[in-house]
Every structure is written in C-alpha cells, then in structure tokens.
Image (cartoon, rainbow, N blue to C red):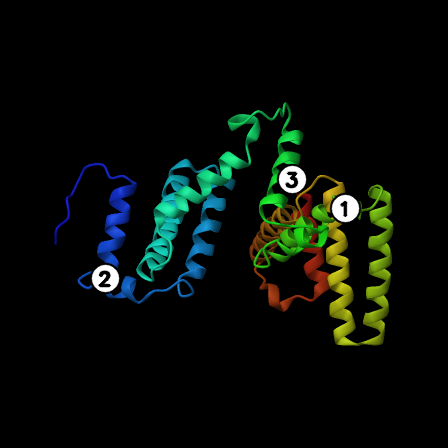
Amino acid sequence: MDFQFKDKYGINDLLEIMRILRSENGCPWDREQDHKSIRKDFLEETYEVVEAIDTDDKELLLEELGDVLLQVVFHSRIEEEQGGFNFGDVADGICQKLIVRHPHVFGDVTAETSGEVLKNWNNIKQQTKGQETYYETLESVCTALPALMRAQKIGQRAKRAGMDFKDVSQVLECLESEIAELKEAVAEGKKESIADELGDVLFSCTNLARHLNCDAEESLTRSTDKFMNRFKETENLIRCDGTDMKSLNIDELDVYWRKAKSK
C-alpha cells in the first residue's frame, strides 16, 4: 500500500485515507456503505459533539469533531465516486455562502449589532434560495430536525410574517385552551383526536418557549435529566430500606419521590 505515515496528519491525509478505505484493496465495510447506510452514524456523531459541549469536555470535543469531519469526508467520497461533487466542492460551497451572507465583512453593508447581522442573513438566505413567500421559508425548515426544535423554528419564521402572539399571557391562554381540548378528547376516548390535541399542546409549548426566550429542546433535556437524577435518588432511598421499587404502589413510591425531591 502506497501510504506515507506521519507524526501529524492534515485534511488532505484524511481525504487520501478515505480514498484508500473505499478502494478495491481497502476495507470491505467502508466499500459497502452509501449515503443512507451511514445516515444514522452522522446523527449519532453530531449528538456526541453536542454532549461533549454540554459536559465541557474539550478532549472529547476534539475527538467527536473529528468523527463528524470523517462523516463529511465519507459522504463526499461516496458522491465523488458516483460522478457528483467532491470534498473541494463542499468546501467551496460553504466558503461562497459565508462570503455572500456576511456583506458587512466582505462587502460595503453596515451591521453594527448581532440583530442586524441576523436580519441581513435571513434576507440574503431568502433571496439566494428564491423564496418568494413566507410559507416557503417555513417549508425550508429541515423536516428531519427533532420535533420540538422544528416546531420552535417554524414558529420563529412565522413571526417574520406577523403571525405570532402579542405576549406571554396570550400564549398561556392558548396553551390552556389546547389543554382543555385535549381533556375533551381524552374524555371521548378517540385515539386519533387525542394524538392531534396532544400535538397542539406540544406545539403551543414551543411557542411559549420562544416568548420566554427559552429553547424547548434544551428545556426538555434538562427536565429529563432532572427526572433521571431524582429517579436514581428515589431508588437508592428505597433500596436502603431493603425494598424493591416494584413491590410498592404509586402512593408509596410518591413518598420516596418527595423525599428525593427535597434533597
């Protein structure tokens, strides 16, 4: 194999390694992959980067960013073999985009604040993508995003067209109304209606998150982590009393839960 081993490698080395892995004499597994087969890997690697950021683990962040970069190189190589774009085209595309969307840096547009920058960015994005209606800006939000994140993003874009609540109290009223409709659906026992109304409640929660300047996805993640920590403490308290959780009824479990919550 014609490969030069080094003490320090760069992006060109990564591209060459991927070429070798995908070659006839490379790795059988790597050769078999296509865009769809490694789609989930890309998602997992991205979430692992987020976890490294959340835990402030710089060493892990370094590693996980490399894994994400590998995915970019992997997909680029697959496409290049099919006669499509290559990694150079990917790099060129993002460079072109950054230059066009930062006219206050690479042009003669003035933008003194982050708000002005974002406004220019969104206007340029809408123009370059040929979006002529507000609905098209909503439609362009990635459908593969986590549901809460997508809903909040769509709500934010609808706001640009003036379609939004006046204040937090108005959002809360809407949320209470949606909860009432959910209760009615539950009382009627219609599964499809229950699912629809529950979705409306969740969508209203994302609107509330926007008006409270909170991120719905992050808020739910923190609450889930909080639940896990309290669950762990509850189980520990029960085990210390020589009891198994499953042997207790919900009222008895609640007593331990309240103890764990008070710690």
Q: What residue is at 32 percent from the left and 55 percent from the top?
A: 77
Circle nearer the viewer, 2 or 1: 1
Q: Which residue is drawn at 63% across and 45% down?
A: 126
Q: Position of residue 156 (x, y in %)?
A: 71, 46
Judge left or right: residue 169 versus residue 149.
right
Kind of residue indicated by mark 2: Cys
Identify whether 192 is placed above or below 18: below
Left or right position of 97 against 74: right
Q: What SS does tag 3 mark? A: helix
Q: How crowded is mark 1: few (under 14 residues within 10 Å), some or many (20 or more)?
A: few
Q: Residues within 10 Å of mark 2 (few under 14, many from 20)?
A: few
Residue underneath mark 2: 27
Q: Which of 76 and 132 is in front in this view?
A: 132
- Graded by Cα atoms within 10 Å as few (under 14), some (14 to 19) or many (20 or more), the crowding at tag 3 reads few
Q: How far apart are marks 1 and 3 (CA)?
A: 13 Å
- Please give the name of the residue rendered at 60% of the width and 63% of the height, measured from the top-left corner: 245
Secondary structure of residue under mark 2: loop
How many marks do you count on the picture? Answer: 3
Which residue sits at x=38%, y=54%? 85
Of the numbered discs 2 and 1, the one sitting upstream in the chain is: 2
> Which residue has dot 3 on it?
123
Q: Badge 1 is on which residue?
A: 161
The amino acid type found where label 1 is placed reads: Ala
User: Which amino acid is tagged 3?
Assistant: Asn
What percent of the width, then of the height, locates residue 146?
59, 56
Nearer mark to the viewer, of 1 and 3: 3
Q: Element type at marker 1? A: loop
Q: Earlier in the sequence, mark 2 or mark 3?
A: 2
Q: Quadrant of the C terminus?
A: top right
Quarter of the image where the N terminus is located:
bottom left
| Residue 196: % across, % down | 75, 67
